Amino acid sequence: MTATRVLVLNSGSSSVKYQLLDMRDSSRLAVGLVERIGEETSRLKHTPLTGGGATSREREEPIADHEAALKAVAEELATDGLGLDSPELAAIGHRVVHGGLKFTEPTVITDEVLAEIQRLVPVAPLHNPANITGIRTAQVLRPDLPQVAVFDTAFHTTMPESAARYAMDVKTADEHRVRRYGFHGTSHAYVSREMAKLLDKAPEDVNVIVLHLGNGASASAVRGGQCVDTSMGLTPLEGLVMGTRSGDMDPAVIFHLARVGGMSIDEIDVLLNKKSGLIGLCGDNDMREIRRRIDEGDKEAALAFDIYVHRLKKYIGAYYAVLGRVDAIAFTAGVGENAAPVREAAVAGLEELGLAVDGELNSVRSDEARLISPEYARVAVAVVPTDEELEIATQTFALVRDRNA
């Protein structure tokens, strides 16, 4: 096929992130973000990456909806000679958060696929509706072009039932699709493969624990290239301590807050998703600010950090047990890639498991995948920058290329 460009869209409730990539060499031609869609003043930041420069352009104006947002994006791309009408555009790849059990791989979007994504809205009420809006808008702009959904949950569909099932009444669980789905799948897939490359091994020969640590955070146990367990569950609320999410918690806390605290379900939902985690513990969800406060002797920030690391260690230990043999641990995403103290603290005391971090290597800042463990360590510890947009583009391009072969 002659068309080699893929536009990647990540549509949120009031934002659209986008990247245009050339899959001949996986290079980025343009990146951008539209935010505050539907508000009085919206903002579009567009950065063309062709011609040897990276000078951003910004627009602040009312952008009523996602259709208007994508039209504005198309205008910016056209200004750089990268318009959506280009014959070099092969497909548009969409990040879709929840694909349930039906979608285990990238999928060309049809009316039937869109209807199934819609049916999954009850288990992804914050994400799937926005993803659907982005898809429908892109279909209007380029009805002739393949639109591909790449699902956050797909990588985790290889989990065995022993890991995916909750210990609750099976009939009730099946009726309401209650099970562990996992999220951040495109990141875990990409990072686990890159980790294998770093070790100069095939993915099927490597067991790796991936720690995706951003404002949202998740861990996965990947055996031979396949996910066998992950920390997020029915929703992204389960698992690690996150920026604003609580992570693991006794479910009876919800009953207690409702019965004794008089809180509504919606109030508890907001509490656990938006007012908990690090921000609930110390008032900050930026790890840089928390570390600054710790350096100044702030006990509240220090306790929040300790709780964060304690949960992280529990998952490292648990997934070590699940995998039996661990070849590597890979830190990724905003905190994982940039917060050396988190990496050091997460591994400290686990020397009996073959884990160690070299202080000098750990302190190096780099955009490259790199080992931070000493040579004698039995298990490799690494920083592997994630690239979810490239993963979406790669999966999208491979699908449309194979269909046209």
Image: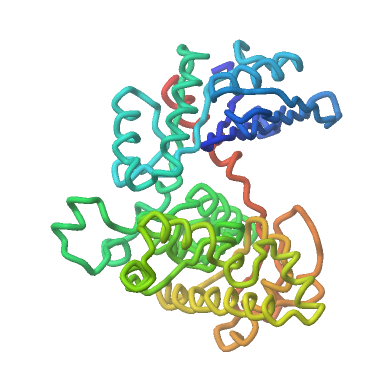
Residue 336 is at least partly visible in this image: no
Q: Quadrant of residue 32?
A: top right
Residue at image x 80%, y 78%?
Answer: 295
Which quadrant: the N terminus?
top right
Residue at image x 56%, y 35%?
Answer: 14
**Vertical arrangement, residue 163 with respect to residue 136, above or below:** below
Q: Nearer the viewer, residue 148 or 2?
A: 148
Q: Position of residue 355 (x, y in %)?
A: 61, 80
Q: Position of residue 387 (x, y in %)?
A: 62, 46
Residue lying farthest front? 262
Residue 224 is at least partly visible in this image: yes
Q: Position of residue 26 (x, y in %)?
A: 66, 34
Q: How is the image coloured?
A: rainbow
Residue at image x 54%, y 24%?
Answer: 65
Side of 164 relative to 193 (left or right): left
Which quadrant: the C terminus?
top left
Q: Quadrant of residue 352?
A: bottom right
**Vertical arrangement, residue 280 with respect to residue 26, above or below:** below
Number of numbered discs visible in the structure rendering: 0
Q: Position of residue 338 (x, y in %)?
A: 73, 61
Q: Nearer the viewer, residue 18 or 22?
A: 18
Side of 170 relative to 195 (left or right): left
